[in-house]
Image (cartoon, helix red, strand yellow):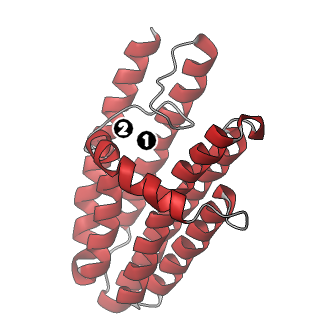
């Protein structure tokens, strides 16, 4: 919901950070890989109920996720022969899906073990993520083939919705900070993502019709 606003205001700070780390040994794919490893570490430590460690790893993972794109665009602007964003974009979105899904499972394991939390809210979150991801990935693929893609600088055509990247980062942080209420947060979040899924399905259908 607020991704466009944040992208506009964070573009310059992220570009400056990308410039600071723009050395040959650091590549966009390596940053994506680091974000993936940090995200999986967050999931594991959440499962072990090391909530504050999991939170730190989660935040670092999302910082890495925010830097790989600006660095890739900076490299392509300097060396157009380096190619387009296809492989890197594929790796990035795949890593995001792995991290989001695994962190839901990690929190579910930790909250269930520590507080006897029910599993069903976390299962609903995963189901909502599945439907949401299917909608926007299908739209991106078909829109590209039909010449109706939405270009906002990212590798895929993203349809806006109530739940976007910024909200996801905040919610995943909240259930680590307030782990005793993790399943209640998950239940509310599942409903929000479900509404967002319906929005994307309707918007995508209308855009392609």
Q: Which residue is mark 2?
A: 197
Q: What is the x, y in percent for residue 97? A: 54, 55
Q: Is residue 196 above or below residue 99?
A: above
User: Mark 2, residues whose alpha carbon is within 10 Å: few (<14), some, or many (≥20)?
Assistant: many
Q: Is residue 11 above or below residue 198?
A: below
Q: Quadrant of residue 203?
A: top left
| Residue 8 visible from this viewpoint | yes
**Local SS, label 2:** helix
| Residue 112 visible from this viewpoint | no
Q: Is residue 61 left or right of residue 203?
A: right
Q: What is the x, y in percent for residue 177? A: 26, 80
In whole angstroms, how far apart are the C-alphas of marks 1 and 2?
Answer: 5 Å
Contact flag, marks 1 and 2 (Cβ < 8 Å): yes
Q: Quadrant of residue 81?
A: top right
Disc number at residue 132?
Answer: 1
Q: Quadrant of residue 176?
A: bottom left
Nearer the observer, 18 or 191:
18
The outermost residue toward the top is 209
Q: Earlier in the sequence, mark 1 or mark 2?
A: 1
Residue at the (49%, 47%) spot, across then down: 130
Residue at the (45%, 64%) spot, across then down: 62
Give the position of the C terminus as an image quadrant.
top left
């Amino acid at each position: 919901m607020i991704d466009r606003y944040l992208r506009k205001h964070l573009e310059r700070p992220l570009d400056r950070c990308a410039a600071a780390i723009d050395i040959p040994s650091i590549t966009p794919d390596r940053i994506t890989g680091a974000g993936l490893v940090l995200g999986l570490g967050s999931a594991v430590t959440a499962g072990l109920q090391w909530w504050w460690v999991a939170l730190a790893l989660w935040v670092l993972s999302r910082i890495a996720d925010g830097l790989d794109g600006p660095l890739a665009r900076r490299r392509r602007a300097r060396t157009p022969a380096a190619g387009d964003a296809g492989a890197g974009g594929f790796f990035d979105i795949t890593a995001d899906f792995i991290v989001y899904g695994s962190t839901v499972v990690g929190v579910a394991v930790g909250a269930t073990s520590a507080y006897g939390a029910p599993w069903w809210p976390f299962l609903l979150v995963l189901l909502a993520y599945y439907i949401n991801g299917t909608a926007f990935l299908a739209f991106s693929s078909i829109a590209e083939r039909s010449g109706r893609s939405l270009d906002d600088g990212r590798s895929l055509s993203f349809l806006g919705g109530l739940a976007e990247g910024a909200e996801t980062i905040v919610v995943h942080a909240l259930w680590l900070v307030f782990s005793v209420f993790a399943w209640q947060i998950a239940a509310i979040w599942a409903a929000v993502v479900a509404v967002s899924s319906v929005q994307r399905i309707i918007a995508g259908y209308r855009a392609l019709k």
